[in-house]
Amino acid sequence: MNKSTPVFEHNTCKGCGGFGHHGDNRCKGCGGSGYQLTKRGFLAAQYLRSLRTDPITDDAKAANLVLALAYQATLMRSGLQRKGAVCEH
Ligand SMILES: [Zn+2]
């Protein structure tokens, strides 16, 4: 298994059952990867892409982003401690 596994929430492709192809034809449902991102996984991937492609030109923006991420990490950590492994992010 040398296919890269997506880090985002995903399901095995229903079209091909995770094989990525139908005989010699690449699966249209997943483009050959064998998986499909869930709606939440897709949004997370899109968000990450936007973070990577939007150049941060302003130092204040960069500082705000770091603060926001640190704040979110703190929330997630305290949420995990309180309610078990439920995470809405
Ligand atoms: Zn497929």
Image (cartoon, helix red, strand yellow):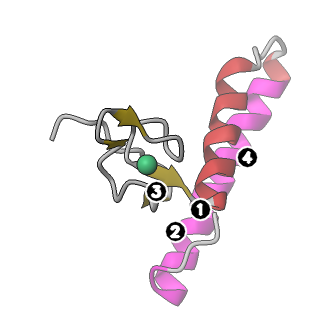
Q: CA distance from mark 4 to mark 1?
A: 10 Å
The verdict on label 3 being within 8 Å of ligand 1 is yes
Q: Secondary structure at mark 3?
A: loop
Residue 57 screen position, x and y as percent: 81, 11
Counting residues from the start of the chain, the first of labels 1 and 3 encountered is 3
Q: Which mark is residue 5?
A: none
* Secondary structure mainly formed by the magenta segment: helix
Residue displayed at 53% across by 47% down: 29
> Mark 4 is on which residue type?
Ala
**Residue situated in front as seen by the camera: 15 or 58:** 15
Single out the mark in the foreground, 4 or 3.
3
Residue at the disc numbered 1: 74
Q: Is residue 59 left or right of residue 36?
A: right
Residue at the disc numbered 2: 77
Residue at the disc numbered 4: 68
Q: Secondary structure at mark 4?
A: helix
Q: Mark 3 Cα within 10 Å, few/some/many (few <14, many 20+)?
A: some
Residue at the disc numbered 3: 15
Q: Residue extending furthest bottom?
A: 83
Counting residues from the start of the chain, the first of labels 4 and 1 encountered is 4
Residue 49 screen position, x and y as percent: 65, 30
Q: Is residue 13 above or below residue 48?
A: below
Q: Do the numbered discs 1 and 2 sit on residues whose CB atoms are within 8 Å?
A: yes
> Mark 2 is on which residue type?
Arg
Q: How many marks?
A: 4
Q: Mark 2 Cα within 10 Å, few/some/many (few <14, many 20+)?
A: few
Q: Which residues are magenta?
A: 61-85
**Residue situated in front as seen by the camera: 67 or 13:** 13
Q: Secondary structure at mark 2?
A: helix
Counting residues from the start of the chain, the first of labels 4 and 2 encountered is 4
Q: CA distance from mark 4 to mark 3?
A: 38 Å
